[in-house]
Amino acid sequence: MKNVITTDIILVDIINFSTLPFSQQLEVVTFLTKSYKRVIEKIFSNSHTSLESLILGFISTGDGFYCILDPKLKGYGTFLGLSFNCFSDQISKKYPYFHGLKIAVHTGNVAQFTDILGNTNFIGEGLNDCSRYIEFKNFTISTVMVSDVAYKEFKKFLKLHKDLEMLLIKREFKHSSLYTFNDKHGKRKKGYLVWMRKSGIITLPKLISN
């Protein structure tokens, strides 16, 4: 199908966001947006290329957002999800009413189109499938849910970038056994919970720019 690409998709969901008063929603979203902007700038500082060539787009969901990576970064989505998650504790300390984040990573198909205002937007089963992993009921603090497909791409990425593999060892990267669950439509999903005991931002390898 024309314009369909397969890439990593990261979904960040703010827990119980819709139950917060409007003023608190605005506070959290504003802080999160500014924080993630700094994170992304730091992550891609070594890439020697424009941010637009690495991230295809961000899509607001109301309770969070999707981040769609360029296909050449397929496999890096798990690293980005872990980097996003490291801010959860900081937000909780600043805003006591903040209940945390759910973050899911999936590798799937998306299609790009131009909306009514002339802006780039995306649709596709990859977005829908990624949102199903947010439904996983055994989420725990500071973990990221990674689909089985995205986890395979993550492992391939690690083989190409041994420096990241060493970094994960230093950060005490951990993963669960494979979980299997049914989403709200009764479809079987498989994935892993991943986390780092020593959280932090994982910058993009210089090799990506070559």
Image (cartoon, rainbow, N blue to C red):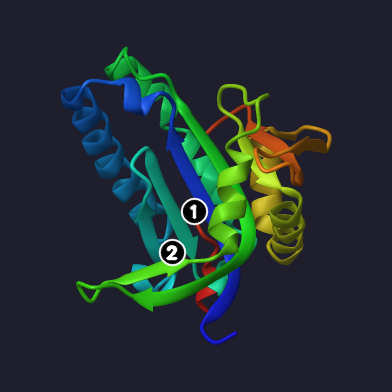
Q: Amino acid at mark 1?
A: Thr
- Give the labeled residue for mark 1: 203
Image location (x, y in percent) of residue 183: 68, 39
Task: Tell me what residue is drawn at x 54 percent, y 87 percent.
Answer: 2
Image location (x, y in percent) of residue 88: 43, 28
Check disc 1 and report its element: helix, strand or loop: loop
Image location (x, y in percent) of residue 131: 55, 46
Work out whether residue 78 can be spotted: no
**Left or right placement of residue 191 versus residue 136 in this view:** right
Q: CA distance from mark 1 to mark 2?
A: 7 Å
Few, some or many C-alpha atoms within 10 Å of disc 1 (few <14, some 14-19, many ≥20)? some
User: Where, quadrant-wise, is the N terminus in this rendering?
Assistant: bottom right
Q: Nearest the camera: 97 or 188? A: 188
Q: Quadrant of residue 144?
A: top right
Mark on residue 184? none
Mark on residue 46? 2
Up/down of 195 relative to 49, above or below: above
Q: In the current view of this chain or complex, which residue is farthest to the left?
A: 23
